Amino acid sequence: MLLTNGVMVTIIAINYILKVVTIMLITWIGYDTYSEQMAKITNGVFVALFFNTGILLLLTNANLADVSDWLSGVFQGRYYDYSP
């Protein structure tokens, strides 16, 4: 339960940081119209959070014991390599 809550908090924290950084960068770039800027912010935040959440969940469930000894202590998921 502690690991699950830790992963959840980590995902939320990294997503928040990515969201803030993406908004700051797109605002810094600047666009001609407000609607164009909002569209770029929306698309940028969606892509960043989508891939970040997907990669973190994939790593959480991965079992990397065959890859490295020090990774086997961290990633002990139930899914090996490419199981269905």
Image (cartoon, rainbow, N blue to C red):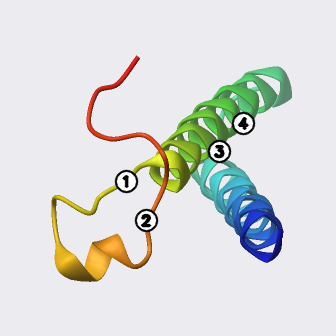
* Residue pointed to by mark 1: 63
Q: Quadrant of the C terminus?
A: top left
Q: CA distance from mark 4 to mark 1?
A: 35 Å
Q: CA distance from mark 4 to mark 3?
A: 11 Å
Give the left or right position of residue 47, taking residue 36 as reference: left
The answer to whether the residues at label 1 and label 2 have Cβ atoms under 8 Å apart is yes
The amino acid marked with disc number 1 is Asn
First-in-chain label (1 vs 2): 1
Identify which amino acid the numbered label 2 is placed on.
Phe
Q: Residue 22, position in %: x, y?
A: 64, 52
Considering only vertical position in the picture, is 39 above or below 61?
A: above
Residue 35 is situated, as x and y percent measured from the top left of the image, at 83, 22
Residue identifier under label 3? 30
- Which residue is label 4 attached to? 41
Tell me: 80 left or right of 75. left
Q: Nearer the viewer, mark 3 or mark 1?
A: 1
Marker disc for residue 77: none
> What amino acid is labelled 3 in the image?
Gly
Distance in Å between CA atoms under marks 1 and 2:
5 Å
**Mark 4 or mark 3, earlier in chain:** 3
Kind of residue at badge 4: Ile
Query: Residue at left 63%, top 47%?
Result: 26
User: Element at badge 4?
Assistant: helix
Res 15 quadrant in image: bottom right
